[in-house]
Amino acid sequence: MFGSVKYRAALAGALAAGLCLVGSAQAREVVPFAEGMGRGSIVVRTSERRLYLVNGDGTAIRYAVAVGKPGKQWSGATEIDGKYYQPDWSPPREVKRDKPWLPNLIRGGSPGNPMGVAAMTLRGGEYAIHGTNRPSSIGTFASYGCIRMYNHDIADLIERVSVGTQVYVVR
């Protein structure tokens, strides 16, 4: 019975329907975006907890994100200076000061690694746009200044942009 074509087709259909239902609340989407930013630019609106990848045709791909906690937020312009898959993570000084029990290094792929499946470092600081091991934090003010994304969204975004991509963080 489990090997029958009919059963496999029904199971595949049920799984696909279930994934669509689960993913719909978290899905990235194409939205109108006419702010004059160049094609391929990233705009993070911390007040909205959203990241926009500008398409250059009056639209952008919008992703849900987590942003800095009150007092840990920043704004400004920078660029992506590195792209990493399964990155190791060393807590920055401020994080280590607040949480001295953290190890000095957490290997990529470890369930305790807060970077998730991928990260893009930002020039000029200790910040990154990265995945997360805490998906429930997405949509909140949760980080020390980094931009957190669902792992499936950072996996998508990292393939769409390159080192040198302009990033604008606005409140």
Image (spheres, rainbow, N blue to C red):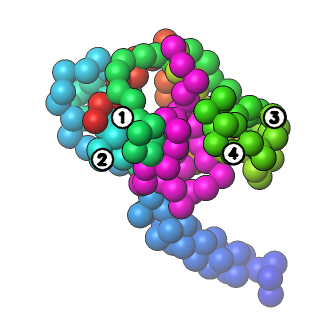
- 149 left or right of 102 in image: left
In magenta stretch: residue 128 = yes
Residue at numbered disc 4 = 99
Residue placed farthest to the bottom in the image? 1
Query: Which stretch appears magenta?
Result: 124-150
Which image quadrant for residue 36? top left
Q: Work out whether residue 145 or residue 43 is closer to the camera in this orientation and state it.
A: 145
**In whole angstroms, how far apart are the C-alphas of marks 2 and 3?**
32 Å
Number of other residues with Cα within 10 Å of mark 1, as a class: few under 14, some 14 to 19, many 20 or more: many
Residue at numbered disc 1 = 44
Number of other residues with Cα within 10 Å of mark 2, as a class: few under 14, some 14 to 19, many 20 or more: some
Q: Work out whether residue 42 or residue 137 is closer to the camera in this orientation and state it.
A: 137
Residue at numbered disc 2 = 48
- 154 left or right of 26 in image: right
Residue at numbered disc 3 = 105
**In whole angstroms, how far apart are the C-alphas of marks 3 and 4?**
13 Å
Instruction: Confirm whether residue 118 shows in the render.
Output: no
**In whole angstroms, how far apart are the C-alphas of marks 2 and 4?**
28 Å
Number of other residues with Cα within 10 Å of mark 3, as a class: few under 14, some 14 to 19, many 20 or more: few
State the SS at label 2: loop
Q: Are marks 2 and 1 in contact (CB under 8 Å)?
A: no
